[in-house]
């Protein structure tokens, strides 16, 4: 890669959004591996949504002692003043 090519590349990268940079990284990774797999971000979305759904279903109170996470935090760190 010539220095002119590198400068052009850096200018282009500076103009891209984070999402566009991620898409470019995925494209480059696929080209190195020689595959045409779907984007990894798209492949992870269902898993991410499943994770969020599981998180919202977690109990907010400990069944063993009846205390919430906030109750435990207040004992450990003290109450907010």
Image (cartoon, rainbow, N blue to C red):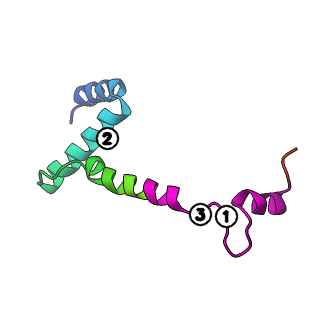
The x and y percentages for residue 29 are 22, 50
Contact, CB < 8 Å: mark 1 with mark 3?
yes
| Image side of residue 40 versus residue 66, left or right | left
* Badge 2 or badge 3: first in the primary sequence: 2
Residue 64 drawn above or below residue 47: below
State the extent of the magenta-drawn residues as a range: 52-78
Q: Nearer the viewer, residue 46 or 16?
A: 46
Q: Residue at x 30, y 48 (%)?
A: 41
Q: CA distance from mark 1 to mark 3?
A: 5 Å
Q: Which residue is mark 1?
A: 61
Q: Is residue 55 magenta?
A: yes
Residue picked out by circle 3: 59
Tag 3, which secondary structure?
loop
Among the two numbered marks 2 and 1 on one chain, the one whose residue lies closer to the N terminus: 2
Label 3 crowd (10 A; few <14 / some 14-19 / many >=20)? few
Q: Is residue 26 magenta?
A: no
The percent coordinates of residue 72 (x first, y second) are 76, 63
Whole-angstrom CA distance, mark 2 to mark 1, is 38 Å
Q: Which corner quadrant of the image does residue 60 belong to?
A: bottom right
Q: Is residue 55 above or below residue 80?
A: below
Q: Which mark is residue 44?
A: none
What numbered label is drawn on residue 22? 2
Which secondary structure, mark 1?
A: loop
Report if the CB atoms under discs 2 and 1 are less than 8 Å apart: no
Q: How many residues crowd mark 2 within 10 Å: few (<14), some (14–19), many (20+)?
A: some
Local secondary structure at mark 2: helix
The picture quadrant where one finds residue 62 is bottom right
Residue shown at the point (74%, 65%) measured from the top left: 67
Query: What x and y, as percent, mark residue 52?
Result: 45, 54
- The image position of residue 1, as x and y in percent, is 21, 36
Q: Nearer the viewer, mark 2 or mark 3?
A: 3
| Residue under the image location 25 percent in, 46 percent down | 26
């Amino acid at each position: 890669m010539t220095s002119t090519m590198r400068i052009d590349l850096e200018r282009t990268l500076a103009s891209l959004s984070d999402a566009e940079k991620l898409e470019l990284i995925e494209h480059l990774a696929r080209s190195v591996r020689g595959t045409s797999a779907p984007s990894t971000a798209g492949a992870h979305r269902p898993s991410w949504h499943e994770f969020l759904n599981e998180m919202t279903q977690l109990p907010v109170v400990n069944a063993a002692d009846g205390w919430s996470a906030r109750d435990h935090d207040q004992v450990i760190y003290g109450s907010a003043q």
